Image (cartoon, rainbow, N blue to C red):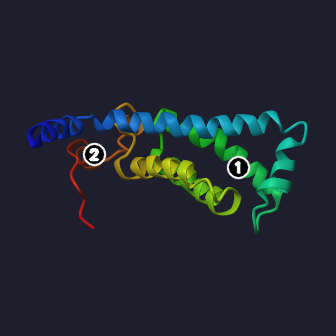
Amino acid sequence: MLEFINRLTTRFQSIPADAISYLARLAVGATFLRSGMLKLEGWSEGNTLALFKDEYRLPVIPPEIAAYLATAAELTLPVLLFAGLFTRFASLGLLFMTIVIEVFVYPNAFDTHGLWAVALLYLMKFGPGAAALDTVLGLNPPSARLLAASGSKSTM
């Protein structure tokens, strides 16, 4: 039985880190882009602003500004993730949004927001993978790619 478990564990460890990065970029990016598209569609009827005034009610930021910022972020940051361009920074922005949503808007949705956060933290730590503009442009240091590929732990 132990041999079987060890064989399966070895198989799990051989899952390509690039595939995980690519899936994280697509899944989280699609989620936020879809939300941005819905906000854009509801903009002309006033639905988006009403959502920020009546349901989201963020502290400190006026709803008019929050609506613009959130819509702009949800329409641009996912595109950066899809392209793998400035991936770590796009992930940081979306992680910030995720935390704001969890803390101030939907505090009982940690199961969803936690999954987003894990994917975004993975991208921040390990980068976008090989199939990304960051890698082509030299913005994804080889050390991060090697760390992700080897499954090694970094020292803190």
Splitting the image into 4 quarters, where does residue 61 fall? bottom right
Splitting the image into 4 quarters, where does residue 2 fall? top left
Task: Tell which of 43 and 54 is nearer to you.
Answer: 54
Label 1: element kind: helix
Q: Position of residue 77 (x, y in %)?
A: 58, 43
Is disc 1 surrounded by few (<14), some (14 to 19) or many (20+) residues within 10 Å? some
State the separation of the CA atoms marked 1 and 2: 31 Å
Task: Tell which of 3 and 92 is nearer to you.
Answer: 3
Question: What residue appears at the point 31 percent right and 47 percent down from the top-left corner?
Answer: 141
**Chain-order first, disc 1 or disc 2:** 1
Q: Which mark is residue 111?
A: none
Specify the quadrant that holds the C terminus: bottom left
Specify the quadrant that holds the N terminus: top left
Report the residue marked by disc 1. 70
Q: Amino acid at mark 2?
A: Ala
Q: Are the residues tagged 1 and 2 within 8 Å (C-beta)?
A: no
Q: Amino acid at mark 1?
A: Ala
